[in-house]
Amino acid sequence: MANGTGAADGARGRRGAAVLGAVLGGCVLVAAATAPASAHARGHGHGTDYVALGDSYTSGPGIPQQVDADCARSDHNYPSLVAARRQVSGFDDVSCAGATTAEMWQAQGTNAPQLDAVHRDTDLVTVQIGGNDVGFGPIISTCAHLAAQDPTGNPCERSYHAAGYDRLALAIVQTAPKVARVLQAVHARTPHARVVVVGYPDLLPDDGSGCFPQVPFAQKDFPYLRDTEKRLNLMLRLVAGVNRAEYVDTYTPTAGHDMCKAPADRWIEPLQPAAPAAPAHPNAKGEDAMAQAVLERLGQGRGRD
């Protein structure tokens, strides 16, 4: 994800980190054509009006065909696949690369505030947001830069713990109320809708192994960054649960297809993609896997997870 920034540090945030840390336990990084920014498609089927909110993991930058250059949005991202397979009657995908929770209420270039797409007649809303609030882009840059100084150690982890606490864990804690506010705003606009929070896919090897220089992080930073993503996903699950939303786990079904795998096996592209996709983002196979996870959740019937 690009252009994200972590939450500011502070005494109040550290107290919050301690509280939520006790809940989360020790478990993200890691982790372009033209068309209207909010295309509204009508079709036949279940009479479901579907709105997709999210960042670049939702929009699918680089994946053909790109239908919105400003937001790097693909017509083969997971919302488009879900809409097609569910045969929804109305579909608005307003996801946008670089979006934070703030862009739910404010315009992002030519993309209107994403929440503007949610109306009283909306039946289904998927939300995938929070990675840029935590700072995906800066995390990647920082860890790649530090790896050159200590490729076999954990310089990135040490840097984020330099103040005596984990700044990434704090950023996740500080992002939780922002995501909660988004979900509350969705419910306020469409009280009857099914609201689904979509987690982030597996970006790095789940066993903690590394693959330098394909992914230029220091060897012992891989498990730290893996755990950071897991912590982010756990936060999203918990926030969904207390805000009348369902949660879709996209990490488990994508495990084993991270950016360290061979091109034929990976669903997340490394920093130098071999398939059409943005660096450190899902390719078409990854978006398809996330779509399948969402469809399975929807097929289970309304409920919380």
Image: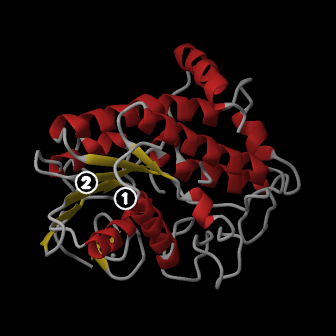
Mark 2 touches mark 1? (CB < 8 Å): yes
Looking at the image, is 186 positioned above or below residue 204? above
Q: Identify residue for label 2.
A: 124
Residue 298: which numbered mark, if any? 1
Q: Position of residue 28 (x, y in %)?
A: 59, 48
> Which residue occupies the extreme front position in the image?
301
- Label 2: how many residues lie within 10 Å, few (<14), some (14-19) or many (20+)? many
Of residue 240 and residue 171, the one placed in the foreground of this image is 240
Query: For the point 54% across and 50% down, which residue is it?
Result: 136
For the point 55% across and 68% down, the residue is 279
Label 1 neighbour load within 10 Å: few <14, some 14-19, many 20+: some
In the picture shown, does residue 255 fall above or below 65?
above
Per the image, label 1 sits on a secondary structure element best described as helix
Q: Where does residue 20 sit, x and y in percent of width and height?
A: 58, 24
Q: Is residue 242 visible?
A: yes
On the image, the x and y values in percent for residue 95 come to: 31, 58
Q: Position of residue 133 (x, y in %)?
A: 46, 41
Q: Within the image, what quadrant is residue 299 found in?
A: bottom left
Q: The residue tagged with tag 2: helix, strand or loop?
A: strand
Between 35 and 43, the residue placed more toward the observer is: 43
Which residue is located at x 44 percent, y 51 percent? 3
> How many angstroms separate mark 2 from mark 1 (CA)?
10 Å
For badge 2, the amino acid type reads Leu
Left or right: 248 as drawn, with respect to 16: left
Q: Tell me if residue 192 comes above or below residue 176 in the rendering.
A: below
Residue type, numbered disc 1: Leu
